Amino acid sequence: MSTLQLYLASGSPRRKELLAQLGYGFERVVVDVEELHQPGEAPAEYVQRLAQDKAQAGVKETDGQTPVLGSDTIVVVDDEILEKPEDYADAKRMLTLLSGRQHQVMTAVTLATAARSKTKLVVTNVWFKALSEKEIEAYWQSGEPQDKAGSYGIQGIGGKFIERIDGSYYAVVGLPLMETDIMVRDFLSLSI
């Protein structure tokens, strides 16, 4: 790996893979941030706060000079936030809500040092085909939905449920590549 340019405050294997695609030298930093939606907090505010909290927690664990990237992704339908499912019943409820309609995936990315912080919110509209109970049950049995916001992964088996998207595919996976690259280049003062 090349010289350390930033830290990734995420345990997500998907975010690690996506950040690696951008070619920056990075290391992971372990952070423990409570993901608890506050009463009256709009979904966009919530996901941005989580990204900021993760980045700031990472800054406290590192030298404070090297940028720390924090990110979070939520699925939103009818202003309801769909996070990771607790069990099959919860996943079935979410997938039934998403079935045959449009929803939003909101991914926020924060880059922070001790001296500065910047957050970008990327919202992607996603349309699901109508799902049968059998499809939902078989999908749960695959094991894929268990650790995914909204109980699905667009980059895996869940991709077969997607009719179309309007926005960033990579933001739905967990890290918008273009927006992240622009932010990192800005923080590192690299020419684009």
Image (cartoon, rainbow, N blue to C red):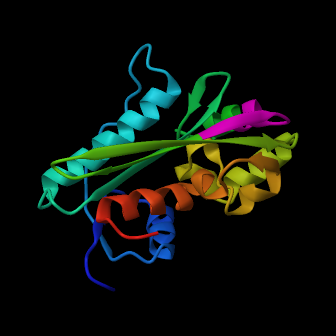
Q: Nearer the viewer, residue 114 or 72?
A: 114
Rendered view: 6 above or below 80: below
Could you say where residue 173 lies in the image, as x and y percent from the top left?
59, 56
Q: What's drawn in magenta, residue-wise?
A: 95-105
Could you say where residue 152 lies in the image, as x and y percent from the top left?
66, 49
Q: Residue furthest bottom?
A: 1
Numbered label tally? 0
Q: Residue at x 62, y 32 (%)?
A: 76
Could you say where residue 127 lies in the image, as x and y percent from the top left?
80, 41
Residue 104 part of the magenta-drawn span: yes
69 on left or right of 177: left
Q: Residue at x 38, y 75 (%)?
A: 24
Q: Quadrant of residue 1?
A: bottom left
Q: Is there any visible trace of residue 11 in the rendered image?
A: no
Q: Is there any visible trace of residue 4 in the rendered image?
A: yes
Residue 38 part of the magenta-drawn span: no
Rendered view: 36 above or below 184: above
58 on left or right of 93: left
Could you say where residue 136 lies in the image, as x and y percent from the top left?
77, 45
Q: Residue at x 44, y 60 (%)?
A: 12
Q: Residue furthest top?
A: 40
157 on left or right of 120: right
Q: Residue at x 44, y 13 (%)?
A: 40
Q: Residue furthest left?
A: 63
106 on left or right of 128: left
